[in-house]
Image (cartoon, rainbow, N blue to C red):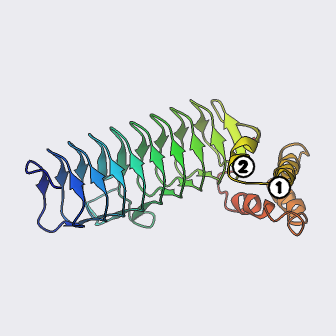
């Protein structure tokens, strides 16, 4: 159902069962997939592609131009997957030509009220961002990541899969997969063992990941030295490969 008070650009493509509330504006070059519900007072600008079964709450701004002074009106994109929940007041911006011209959000993510996702961010699947989290430009987030309320992530940082940040964490360097962190600035506090248990990791796998964490954070090794040791563990501990890949992808250095 599309409310008669909504403003839909003629070039926008909405699946037949998309629901749009009153006083919502959907601009040119926007595509929205089946089952998506858009509440009142939402603004969606293109080029933006939104998948199926998403729900976008009131006062969210999706696909707006980025807050980058270098942006000069280039036709950049925002792509959003399926089954995401974008709560009140969230802002999600399109990419810039200084990166890959695209902001990407995967599927099954929860963005609580007033979360900001800046230009060129790449967000995976099954993540939870609590109220007032802010991702600066070019941030990469893996899968199954939890960011506590008011977490702030510096531009170009990477946060590995299955990691978790406590409320109010300020992230200035990369966070490896599985690592729990907290503080201003972020410091490591072991692995996210409870999250791993909930996702079906065995006790043995969690113990192996804990051993890998100690290689990185307890042995006084540089990152490349830690990677070398971790690679010797992968045949017996395949879970460690995800941790290795997050270390190799780091460009800003990891939290210590």
Direction from residue 16 to residue 223 in the image, left or right: right
Element on which disc 2 rests: helix
Q: Are marks 1 and 2 in contact (CB under 8 Å)?
A: yes
Direction from residue 78 to residue 244 in the image, left or right: right
Dividing the image into 4 quarters, which one contains the C terminus? top right
Vertical placement of residue 128 versus 11, above or below:
above
On the question of residue 64 being in view, the answer is no
On the question of residue 176 being in view, the answer is yes
Vertical placement of residue 194 versus 140, above or below:
above
Where in the figure is residue 103, as x and y percent of width and height?
42, 60
Vertical placement of residue 27 versus 13, above or below:
above
Where in the figure is residue 137, as x and y percent of width and height?
46, 51
Q: Earlier in the sequence, mark 1 or mark 2?
A: 2
Q: Which of 167 and 223 lies nearest the eye of the viewer?
A: 167
Q: Quadrant of residue 180?
A: top right
Q: Residue at x 64, y 33 (%)?
A: 185
Q: Residue at x 18, y 55 (%)?
A: 1
Q: Residue at x 27, y 40 (%)?
A: 58
Where in the figure is residue 55, as x and y percent of width and height?
34, 50
Q: Residue at x 39, y 36 (%)?
A: 113
Disc 2 crowd, CA 10 A, few/some/many (<14, 14-19, 20+):
some
Name the residue at the left extreme.
4
Residue underneath mark 2: 196
Residue underneath mark 1: 205
């Amino acid at each position: 159902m599309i409310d008669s008070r909504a403003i839909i650009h003629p070039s926008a493509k909405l699946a037949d069962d998309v629901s749009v509330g009153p006083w919502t504006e959907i601009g040119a070059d926007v595509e929205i997939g089946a089952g998506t519900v858009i509440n009142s007072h939402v603004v969606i600008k293109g080029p933006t592609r939104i998948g199926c079964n998403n729900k976008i709450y009131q006062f969210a701004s999706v696909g707006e131009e980025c807050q980058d002074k270098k942006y000069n009106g280039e036709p950049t994109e925002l792509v959003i997957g399926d089954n995401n929940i974008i709560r009140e007041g969230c802002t999600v911006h399109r990419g810039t030509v200084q990166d890959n011209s695209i902001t990407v959000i995967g599927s099954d993510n929860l963005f609580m009220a007033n979360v900001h996702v800046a230009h060129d961010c790449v967000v995976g699947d099954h993540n939870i961002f609590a109220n007032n989290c802010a991702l600066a430009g070019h941030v990469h987030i893996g899968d199954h990541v939890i960011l506590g309320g008011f977490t702030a992530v510096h531009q170009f940082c990477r946060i590995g899969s299955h990691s978790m940040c406590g409320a109010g964490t300020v992230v200035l360097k990369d966070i490896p997969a599985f690592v729990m962190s907290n503080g201003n600035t972020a410091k490591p506090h072991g692995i996210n063992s409870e999250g791993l248990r909930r996702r079906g990791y065995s006790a043995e796998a969690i113990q192996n990941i804990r051993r890998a964490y100690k290689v990185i954070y307890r042995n006084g090794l540089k990152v490349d030295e830690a990677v070398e040791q971790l690679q010797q563990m992968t045949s017996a501990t395949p879970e460690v490969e995800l941790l290795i890949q997050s270390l190799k992808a780091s460009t800003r250095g990891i939290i210590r």
